[in-house]
Amino acid sequence: MADHEFDYDLFTIGAGSGGVRASRLSAMKGKKVAVAEEYRPGGTCVIRGCVPKKYMVYASNFSKSFKQAKAYGWDVGEPEFNWTQFRDTMNAEVDRLSGIYARNLANAGVELIEDRAELEGPNTIRLVNQDRTVTAKHILIAVGGAPNKDESLKGVEHTITSNELFHLPELPKHIVIAGGGYIAVEFAQVFAGLGVETCLVYRGETVLRGFDDDVRTAVHEGLKEAGVRVITHTVFDKIELTDEGAKTKRVTLKNGDVIEDVDQVVFAIGRDPYTEGLGLENAGVEVNDKGAIKVDEYSKTNVDNIYAVGDVTDRVNLTPVAIREGAAFVDTVYGDTPNAYDHATIPSAVFTQPPVGTVGLTEAEARHEYGEVDIYKSQFRPMKGIITDHPDKMMMKMIVRQSDQVVIGVHLVGDDSPEIIQAVGIAVKAGLTKAQFDATCAVHPSVAEELVTMKEKWIPPELRAAE
């Protein structure tokens, strides 16, 4: 039974990864819990993010595998890609996973309310479509984020976002993507790998702002090697239909370039917290300039009984982080001891081709924070591609704090980097030293062995010349 003053002990808004984890754990502690979801259980990751995106990466990567297979004696003929068959298979799997989320909530005793929920006060929630209000002792906001567009752009109505890319009626012949973050570069390489003429338009100079500079350079070069036309230092000026009733579009850029005969124009310029119209002002919940909900280290807002986790707080916008924040919320509110999830040293991946794995500080961050650091770096062509006409590249970089030789950052670009960085993340999180990495025996032959065999400090060419 809920607290007699309220309908629920906990009401969660948003059935994504963070909200579902918090709701299930709370219900398993005997609390009366409801979660409202206006679309489908699963959130960004399952429905329109990590899961279907990774399937698209897998599909795209086969084009390279077919090319490499010839060097290994395989004759696969002329491969042909069927977009609609793949799309429907992918979305059927998304449907299955969404159903699992719903069943897991039910099995834990959580009431799933398929409706849009908005705040009417610090303890009151309005269910919009049902036109009724409910009350809760605690409210958890886990509504995530949403892709944004430049709504002032002339012809913005002719553009789509990453949300729609998973449901395209047909594979485009020519696609133009705006943005230089991980979503933009991942999809640029996906469509290039599927044989689509692909153009990436980015206002900056090198993609993946915020990542280590060597990672950024490697990914930028990888885009061009994959056949992506990369146009930098400019943005869209206007989007027009080629002619009346035409499906193709003309994209004019601020630098004067005109891109003709474009089937799809995609905005991938970032995601904003999904707080508009949520009624936060009715409950007195504070947000920052970007619309993200302000929270303390325990995910509590400025209102004592209202908490927020996941992308809506714009801290570290990753699915596993939202899950950990949701679990920490349950410990804090319904457990014996408050739990503040540690957001430092979180490993992450970018599923470009080749992919990125990264954990800890970038070189620039490390120098700013600690001053003296040692850099170890290796660039090579992995064994798998050496005998093919399409050899890959691998970049590995290790950043070591000079004062105590603790490894404070590892950055990888190359096949299997996401898998490798998960294990390396344990070592970096544990604060192991370069000597402890070196003392670990190599696994041969593997690309990962380079992480324990890099012995020579990297010296910038200009300093090398001075010696």
Image: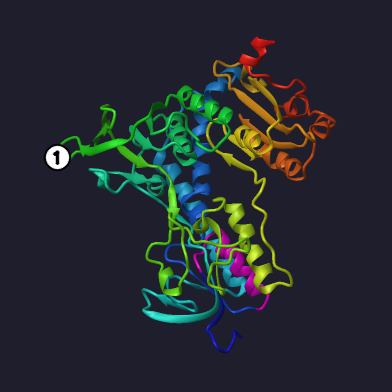
Q: Is residue 23 located in the magenta-colored stretch of the structure?
A: yes
Frontmost residue, 69 versus 351: 351
The residue shown at (79%, 39%) is: 432
Q: Is residue 324 left or right of residue 174?
A: right
Q: Quadrant of residue 258?
A: top left
Q: Main secondary structure of the magenta part?
A: helix
Q: Is residue 35 left or right of residue 1?
A: left
Residue 154 appears in the picture as rendered: yes
Residues drawn in magenta: 13-30
- Which of the image's four quarters has the N terminus? bottom right
The residue shown at (44%, 38%) is: 184
Q: Is residue 309 above or below residue 242?
A: below
The residue shown at (68%, 42%) is: 422
Residue 95 appears in the picture as rendered: no
Q: Quadrant of residue 138?
A: bottom right
Frontmost residue, 173 versus 427: 427
Q: Residue 397 location in percent, x, y?
A: 66, 29
- Which of the image's four quarters has the C terminus? top right
Q: Is residue 97 left or right of residue 245?
A: right
Q: Quadrant of residue 446?
A: top right
Residue beneath disc 1? 244
